Structures are given as structure tokens and as C-alpha cells.
Image: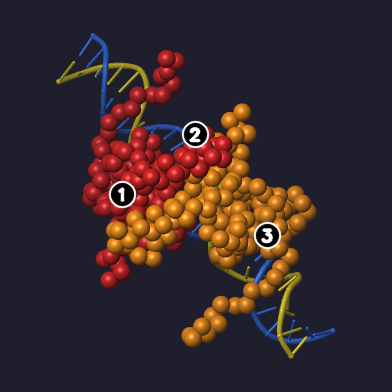
Chain colours: A orange, B red, C blue, D yellow
Amino acid sequence: MNQTMDVPAKRNTKQKDAVRHALSETTGFVSAQDLHLVLRNHGSTVGLATVYRALADLAASGEADSIQATSVAGTGETLFRACGQSHHHHLICTECGKTVEIAAATVEKWAEAIAAENGFTESSHTIEIYGRCASCTA
Amino acid sequence: MNQTMDVPAKRNTKQKDAVRHALSETTGFVSAQDLHLVLRNHGSTVGLATVYRALADLAASGEADSIQATSVAGTGETLFRACGQSHHHHLICTECGKTVEIAAATVEKWAEAIAAENGFTESSHTIEIYGRCASCTA
DNA sequence: GCATTATTGAGAATGATTGTCAATACCGAC
DNA sequence: GTCGGTATTGACAATCATTCTCAATAATGC
């Protein structure tokens, strides 16, 4: 028990709640910048840095998931999304950003097996499926 | 055949070859900056921008794969690696960067099936497995 | 209510990546 | 082999997302 409280106690603030709420409103993934803009447009005065901090906290506590927008334009921003607590993956529409959560025990097991086969321990994985959703295929 | 050559013809240059070669020397993933440094240390005078351009070309032509270094420190740089032509995934050691190529038809099918089930077309996917390799587990 | 101190917000700072543009070198034609 | 058109290069500026700084603010325990 050497947890000598190096970590300061967390406080609940309006802006963190605002970010959490704004994030839960979105259907797909949003960038921190977009979320900041949305909040400002809704009258909030949150600072951009605060949005980043709040999102980092949410991601750390498992309330949000983040992916890297490599396929899209830009310098590769980080996109966030409010997510269920249990481990899962995403099926994302590259056109409209609509996202479906995928739970697949099979693949989890496969990933771990592959890692183990190669002598890797403490394995984790990143699995995202992209495509064009029905609405966007028109 | 409306390929009205909007795209200029590609040329083979020493620096592109140098980048290709330097990349093939590495066992794991390297950042563009690292590769640039290596090349300079080897006496080359390649510019950083050129390394980025060469890597982008290689990635586009399928000669290299790229991943986003989110798990590692830094502002999330893009890492590159020379790769076999056929579609595959990676098992990467988070400690030393050692990388094993994984071919898994099973998962390919699974990913496509999931996409299809949800009405998604033109599906693609990103699958990376991370862990600590045998040598690093000590 | 009050003091303590985590959190905020504005802007500066950082760091990776891309754009600019004159100089260079590749490639096909002669 | 030489020549010319032009893709490519390299040095540096510019951009963009993200993080840091620090004084001001507000949440929490008493």
C-alpha cells in the first residue's frame, strides 16, 4: 500500500459535465475541436484546453473511446465518442461517421491466442471496421 | 479509359531508394523523423520533407504500412514499416517495437461479415495486436 | 461562511506534418 | 552522349492539433 496519494482528488465541475453531456449527444465520433465549437455555440464558455482535459479524463476512466482519424483529412486528429463500459469495437461509416458498437468474444480470444502463440504477454488490441453505411450507399 | 494522365509520371530517385532501403533495414516501426535521422547519420543529405513524401508514396503503393503511435509517448506520430504486399495485420511489442506479421483469413471474413450484417459496404478494417514480447518479459 | 487547492481559460509553446519555391537531377528524345 | 522538359528535392516557413503556463476561479471539507 504505497499509494501515498500522489494523485490529487478529482472534483466535479460544470464544464466536465458539459463535455460529458455534449459527447453523449453525438452519434458518431467527434474531435475535441468540434466538441469545443459545439459547446461554444450552445453558449458555454469552456476553453479548448479544458475540453481536451475533460476528454482525456473520460477516455482514461473508460467513459469514452478514442480513435485516430487517419483515413480522413487533416493532420490526424483524435476523435472521441461516449461508449458503454464493457470492452467492444466499432463499425464506423467513413461517409457520415455513424458508429455501431461491436462486441465479439471470438475475436478477443483470437487476438489473445495469436499473442500467446508468439510469446507475447499483456496483450491488448485495436480493432476498427470501416465501411459505408446503408444510408450513405443510397 | 479516361485516365487522362492528370497524375505526373513517377521517377526513381536516389533518395526514394534510400528511404525504401533504410525502411527495409528496420525490424519494427519507425517514425519519419527517426528514419530521417538515420539517413543523415549514414551520410545522406535527404531533407525531412522528402522522407515524409517518400514514405507517403510507399504507403500509398502498398510497400509500407503505417500505424498511429497513440499508445506511446509524444504527440502521436505516424510510424512506418516495410511490409509484404499481401493484406495482413501486426503483432507489436510495446516495449521494443518488434513486429510480427499476422495473416488471418478468419478475422478478415469476420470483419466483412459484421459490416455486411449492419448494411455496410466497401468495408475495410484496422487490426493491431499489442503486447510485450518474450525477450522483453525477461 | 472560509480556507484550501483542483480546475479553469486564454494564449503561448511544442512538435509532427505539409506547403512553398528556386535549384537540381531524372528520363526520354535526338 | 547531350539536351530539354519537368518531377523531385531541400531548406525553411506555415499549419494544425495538442499540451503547457499561470493567474484567476470555484468546488469541497470544516
Element at badge 2? strand
What's the residue type where badge 3 is placed?
Answer: Arg
Q: Are marks 3 and 1 in contact (CB under 8 Å)?
A: no
Alpha carbons under labels 3 and 2: distance apart: 32 Å
Determine the secondary structure under disc 3. Answer: helix
Q: Nearer the viewer, residue B111 or D20?
A: B111
On the same chain, marks 3 and 1? The answer is no
Residue at numbered disc 3: A20
Instruction: Answer with left or right where residue B56 lies relative to residue B11.
Output: right
Q: Quadrant of the N terminus of chain B?
A: top left
Q: Amino acid at mark 2?
A: Glu
Q: Are marks 1 and 2 on the same chain?
A: yes
Q: Dot 1 corresponds to which residue?
A: B101
Residue D11 position within the rendered picture, expressed as x and y whole percent measured from the top left: 37, 44
Q: Quadrant of residue A55?
A: bottom right
Along the viewing direction, whichever of B31 and A109 lies nearer the viewer: A109
